[in-house]
Amino acid sequence: MSAVRIVSILGAVIGWTALILQLVLIMGTLAEQGPLFAVWRYLGFFTILTNIWCTILMTNAAIRPASRNGRLQRSELAAATAIVIVGIVYSIALRDTWNPQGWAAVADHLLHDISPIAFAVFWLLRPHGGLNWRDAALCVIWPVIYGVYALVRGSIDGWYAYWFLDPSAMELTQLLQTALALIVGFAAVGLVLITADRLLGRRAARPR
């Protein structure tokens, strides 16, 4: 069994375990509001949605290791960019805002620390060399979609998953600056990963 398949299997197990555990915890915390409300709140987090995406990709690689085309390669690039940003933003802006205990701490570390590392390793082990610089534009599509989704959700129920996307907590100019900074950050990480892809592709193409 190849290293990438082993990592994809382990990553998928870790991912689904973390996602299920977090869902159970949220449903327990919001038991009075009912399961549908808990699921609605659960699906409001960029971390959760990105982890679902990455876990699906690793599950697909574990089940069908030979099934990969250009579209899937670009999806993995965008997912890798997003999950790396999850780890970075959480460590910089969110980790100190709460102190999870017990199983909540386990889920927190799995989703924000272990899963990003697992997917990054998975991505590095995949075949490389097929990405172009313009593919960096694909890396900003998901955060833009999520930003619109988060603002629409918040306008409906008044709840925002992240303080830096809450229009009631800052002026419009601050919100736009934050959004722009995040988009630039996603594009920058995407470019770093594309650079790595091209270097790894050239290395693999060298005669041995």
Image (cartoon, grey):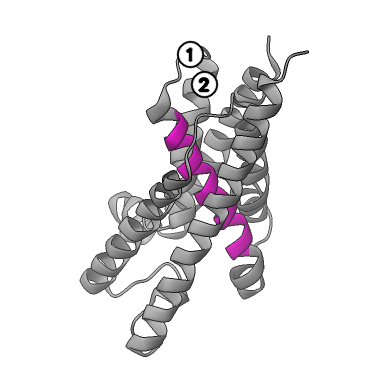
For badge 1, the amino acid type reads Arg
Q: Measured from the top left, where is residue 111 in percent x and y?
A: 59, 48
Residue 26 within the segment the image draws in magenta? no
Q: Give the Cα separation between the discs numbered 2 and 1.
A: 5 Å
Q: Locate residue 175: give its quadrant.
A: bottom left
Q: Residue at x 73, y 14 (%)?
A: 207
Left or right, 26 with respect to 145, comes to right
Q: Is residue 79 above or below residue 124?
A: below
Seen in the image, is 109 located left or right of residue 80? right
Q: Is residue 32 left or right of residue 102?
A: left
The residue most toward the front is: 207
Decide: is 144 above or below 169. Answer: above
- Is the residue marked by circle 1 packed among few (<14), some (14-19), or many (20+) residues within 10 Å? few
Q: Position of residue 189 (x, y in %)?
A: 57, 54
The spot of residue 145 in percent (x, y) is 31, 56
**Residue appearing at x 42%, y 21% in the figure:** 69
State which quadrant residue 34 falls in.
Answer: bottom left
The residue most toward the right is: 208
Q: Secondary structure at mark 1?
A: loop
Q: Is residue 43 visible?
A: no
Residue 20 visible, this orientation: yes
The N terminus: image quadrant: top right
Q: Which residues are magenta?
A: 73-90
The numbered disc on residue 64 is 1
Classed neighbour count for the residue bearing mark 2: other residues with Cα under 10 Å, few (<14), some (14–19), many (≥20): many
Residue corresponding to mark 2? 61
At 42% from the left edge and 67% from the top edge, which residue is drawn? 161
> Which residue occupies 50% across, 29% down?
130
